[in-house]
Every structure is written in C-alpha cells, then in structure tokens.
Image (cartoon, helix red, strand yellow):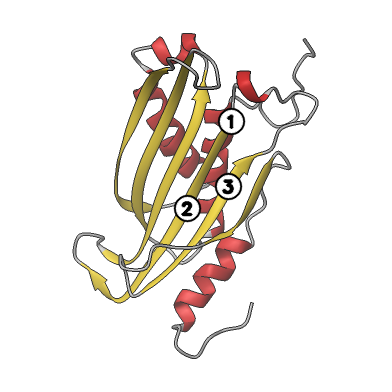
Amino acid sequence: MTTSPAEPARFRAAVDAMNAATVRPEIEVGPIRPPQRLAPYSYALGAEVLHDEADRVPEQSEGDAFGRLILLYDPEGDEAWHGTTRLVAYIQADVDETLAADPLLPEVAWSWLVDALEAHGEAMTALGGTVTATTSVRFGDIAGPARAHQLELRASWTPRTDRLTPHVEAFCEVLAYAAGLPPVGVSRLQR
C-alpha cells in the first residue's frame, strides 16, 4: 500500500499493522469499504469463514460466519473514545438451535471477545457492546431452513497501544469461536 500525503503517518501505520495479522486458513480477511462519516480517517477489514465446498449445502447451511473490524482515527482525539483510535467490531454467525436456546449464549459470546483480547495481551479501554441471539422462522416460498438461528456481536474499544495486529488476530479468533470452528490443530470428525 502506498501512503497518501493526506493520511497521518500514525493512521497509515495502524492500517499496515492491521494488514500484517496472521489468521487461521479457514478465515479469509481483506479490505472492505469503511464507513465515511464516523471519523476523519477510517479503514475496514472484512472477514469470512470459508467452507469446504463439499460440505456446503446452501439451503441447510449451518455455521456461516462473517464480520468486519473497523479502524476509526481522529488525530484530535475523541472524549468518548478516551483516545485517538477506536476499533469497532461486528460479527454475525449462524448457530444451531441448541446453542441459540442457551440463555447464557450472550454472556459466553462476550467472554470470547474479552478473553481473546486478553490472551493476545492487548490493553484497551472503553470496551462496550452488545450480543444478540435471534431465531428467524420462514413462511411460504422463501428458500432456506424453516428456522434459522443467529448470533450477532457488536463491540468497540480503544486500544492503548498502536499495535493493532493482535487486535485483528483476537477478532478473528472470536469469529472462529462464533462459527464453531474447532481449536487450531484439532480436526473435525467426518459425518
């Protein structure tokens, strides 16, 4: 990537750090269009869990998961952010009926985020967000399963350092949890 003279060096360094993250091979990460009016400078990464085409059954798809991680930068700082840099995360994942019915799912999903950030040794402030579990019921001629269950996590936080690579890696770890991927080094048994 080339540095634009209009972009502050600190913002460019943050973007480069985000793109330097190493994630699981099952997760594809790449730049997407960022929101334009939330901060003077913004950048976004999209992430999607890839599936083996042999395992994919579009109308009965379980485990589809994607997300985005947005970098907001304001050189003047933002009082609500407690700093100049803010990360905003969004994850959506299909989950099975049993997991969707668990009343502790929101607390568990939130702990995935907190634990992943802490495991990557990242100091942050002003962490906040929501976790929503939904069930959709299809009627009539709409394709897809009769019932679908989804988990949605929205969060934002202010990193205390300029090291954003571990934040991207933690975000992708949460996406893997939400998608139901087995831990790294563990293989799923074939059905």
Element assignment for label 1: loop
Tell me if mark 2 has few (under 14), some (14-19) or many (20+) residues whose alpha carbon lies within 10 angstroms of its own.
many
In the displayed structure image, the side of residue 60 where residue 93 appears, left or right: left
Q: Amino acid at mark 3?
A: Ala
Q: Which residue is mark 3?
A: 47
Residue plotted at (39% across, 11% down): 102
Residue plotted at (52% across, 29% down): 178
Q: Which residue is mark 2?
A: 69
Specify which label sits upstream in the sequence, 1 or 3: 3
**Residue 39 in the image: above or below residue 67:** below
User: In terms of image quadrants, where is residue 31?
Assistant: bottom right
Question: Are the two marked residues, 1 and 3, in contact with CB atoms closer than 8 angstroms?
Answer: no
Residue plotted at (52% across, 15% down): 96
Element assignment for label 2: strand
**Nearest the eye: 13 or 132:** 132
Tell me if mark 1 has few (under 14), some (14-19) or many (20+) residues whose alpha carbon lies within 10 angstroms of its own.
some
Q: Which label was assigned to residue 64?
A: 1
Residue plotted at (38% across, 52% down): 88
Residue closest to the far bottom: 5
